[in-house]
Structures are given as structure tokens and as C-alpha cells.
Amino acid sequence: MIAYHGRTTGILYTCFVLFFAAACSTSKRGLFTKQTAHEQYASRLTDAGLASSALGSLWFAAAEKALARPLSITLPYKETGYFAAEKPDAAGYLFPARRGDVLKIAITGKPTSSFKIFADLWQPAAANEKPVLLAAADTTSWTLQHEVKADGRFLLRLQPELLRSGEYTVTITTAPSLAFPVPGSTQPRIGSFWGANRDGGSRSHEGIDIFGKFRTPVISAADGFISSTRENKLGGRVIFLNPDGKPYSLYYAHLDSVLVREGQKVKLGDTIGLMGNTGNARNTATHLHFGIYTNGGAIDPLPFVNRDRPAPAEVTAATVLLQHIIRNTGATSLIASPVKNGTLIEKLPANRVMQVMAATGSWYKVALPDSREGFVESKAVSAQPYKKQLAKNATPLLDAPDTAAAVKITIPAGADIDILGDQGAYRFITYGKQKGWVQL
């Protein structure tokens, strides 16, 4: 639930001091078990006796929430958000990637001296199973890279240390895991892609065709060795190259000349042949057919070599509203991902209360009072009250929109209040320097 009330600074500081006093003396790390930075920190919280405390239990619950209920995004992605010390939280992002992509995750934080974020990359859980940890960032470098071995969905969790406030920006992009097999200086272009019809539809294209001038150099896309050079009717003069440490072979076809021999070691960027028209390419424009073969057959090589990757949209939503309570000025959609056609979570009536957790592009990531999260367009919201009113009677100011919530103060009859937004029968208001919920 959105935290609309604070906890005392004294309690926070005392917990903070006790944690680090205990954490520095603990030795229960496991001598032979390699733990991620997040796991090490969680162990320190437990050893310090904070896992069962109010704040500690919220920190552990937030970590689980980020894995169980991540928000869906598409790459490339960039987000600026804020984690508040008084409300332990974590962010989860679910996104697709393809075999051959390299996921590149970069995080920056403010303040840089005292604010650290744990970043863990996971394979989402199948039914009745736990998610699989794939990689974890070193909190000193704030970066993470992972080569995708199979098409699928991936889950990134970000979480700060307990009792630390700070702003973060996370950028998630992809890059090719292999070099492009034709030098960029020759201005090559891809003219035919994986799956295109061949021979009147009797077969499909098992690779990509890269066009260039006759006898343009073709290069090794990775360190490796030449497993075969041969000539056949379909590919003409061809080369098979096995990259070091990879479970697949690279296939170069329609070469005019082969400049390597079987068994030869090659380095990334070595010229191994010259582009041509041999095989069934005799009557086509000069090109290189480039393919990738595994034990299971051919796979699409484009993600492995594609250099044309867009940059993420810059954050244009105002970040001054991070962690602020806002409302939508008219009926608007809360959606599961920051795109126009994203899955609808709820059609929100005007003046619904929400809290801004982060900004991405022209969208805000928000949390509703019932803890549901999603995205709304930044142009559809305001942090200003929509109504001023006099309290007709003495009115309890609650710390949550619930009849069982604690009463912060009692607002006297006739007092001026500003109404910011609604949640069912409750109104979120400001009275002087106090904020909270009332039933009017």
C-alpha cells in the first residue's frame, strides 16, 4: 500500500545503527557458497535480527513482490525513479529478448556516495517453480551484461539497501553478441532476412543476405577456428567457422574466394574470404549468405549481428513528482506497460489518488492505494488539489483509506482542507502541513 505517512526519524536511525553494528560482526556467510550482493545483504539483515522487524519484513516482502509481480516493458528502456528510506521497496521489470542478444543494464544513482542498488537478472519461474538467477550486478560498478542463450522472457529486479533514499536511472538495452561479418567501412546492407520464401515457397531462407560490392572482404565474426571449407551447388564456395566456447557454427556462403584453410585459428575481424556470386547466387546481386547452425538446425542469425539498435526514449515526464501523491485529472487508463496499446489494468475515474514511483518516456509508473502498480500518461495527472472545502464537523485524519486505520489528528469543524484525490468513499487531503485520508 502507498505510504502516506512517515515513521519517526529516531526509530529509523536507531535501527540503522543496530543493523550495521551487527552486520559488521556477523560471520555467517558460508565459506564455499558464492552469494550475490543481494543475498549477502539479506543474510546480514537476518543475522542482525532485522528480518522480523517491521522495516525488515517490508524489505523482504518488496524483494519477493518484484519477482512475483513485475511490470512488463519492451526494450530499449530507460527509467528514472526514487526509492524512499521510510518505505522499503523494489522494482521488477519483465521483458523479452532473443538468442544472440547481449542484455546491457546500466544503473546510476544519486547520491553516489551512500546509495547502492542491487540488480539481479532472472529467468521467470515456470508453473510451481522458482525463478532462476542468471546474473547479478556488482554494486561497485552498477552494470550488468548477459548473453541470451535462448529466446524468452527475462526479469530484472532492482532494490536498494534498507533505510537508504536515493534517485536512480536504469537503462536496459541490447547489443549483438557477434561482430558483423562484413566491415562497416564497405557500407554493406542486409537485403534478405530469415524465413523469406525460396524456390517458390518450397523452402524458407535459413539466414540473412548481406549485399556489397564484388570481392568485398568478409571477416571472422568472433575468435575461433575454421571447421570446414568446401563447395556445393547451393552455397557455392563456403566456410564454416566455430567460435570459441559457443555451441554453434557460423556459415559463410556464395564466396568468390576462400582465404582460410580447414583447422586454421582465426581472430575477430580477420578477413577469411571475399564476397561473390557462387552457387545458386550466380544470377543475383553480389552478396554474402550468413547463417548460424546448431545441433538442432539453423537459427536466425540477425540478433547475433544486428547493429541497428534504437536508443531508449529519453525521460520527458517531470521527475520532480517522484514519490509525490498525484491524481488523474480526467478518466484515464492504468495499463500494464508504458505503451498506448498496453494491457488495461483499470479504467480510472477522474481524481483517483496514486503515488509516482518512476518516470519513463512520457509515462509515470504509479502505485494505487491498494498496492497495484501500472503506468499512466504524465499529461493526464496533476499534483494540485481539485477542490477546497470546509470541514463541516470534527473529522478524523486517517493514515490509510480504511475504517481500521490509525487516526493522525482530528481536524476541527470549520477548518479549510484541500482535496487532492479520491479512493472510494475516502478523500486524500491536506490540512496545514498534515496529509491523510478523511471521509466527508
Image: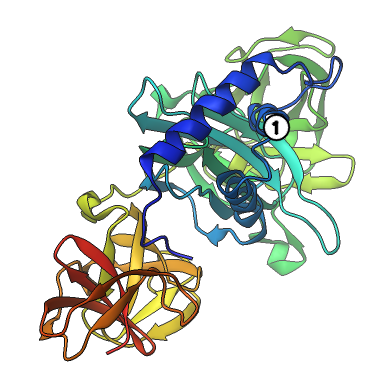
Report the quarter where the C terminus lies: bottom left
The mark total stands at 1
78 or 161: nearer the viewer: 161
Q: Residue at x 64, y 47 (%)?
A: 60
- Residue 353 visible in the snapshot: yes
- Compared to residue 158, the image places residue 249 above or below, namely above
Rendered location of residue 287, percent (x, y): 56, 37
Expressed as whole percent of the image width and height from the top left, the position of residue 168 reads 38, 38
Q: Residue at x 68, y 39 (%)?
A: 148
Which residue was labeled with disc 1?
39
Pick the front one: 265 or 243: 243
- The part of the image, by quadrant, that contains residue 423 is bottom left
Crowding at mark 1 (Cα within 10 Å: few <14, some 14-19, many 20+):
few
Q: How is the image coloured?
A: rainbow
Q: Nearer the viewer, residue 304 or 231?
A: 304
**Residue 181 appears in view:** no
Q: Secondary structure at mark 1?
A: helix
**Which amino acid does the dot numbered 1 rest on?**
Glu
Of residues 80 and 82, the one nearer the viewer is: 82
- The image quarter containing residue 242 is top right
User: x, y (%) of residue 135?
Assistant: 68, 33
Above or below, comparing residue 60 to residue 138 in the picture: below
Q: Is residue 439 above or below residue 368?
A: below
Q: Residue at x 58, y 19 (%)?
A: 21
- Whether residue 395 sits left or right of residue 245 in the image: it is left
**Residue 420: % across, % down:** 21, 75
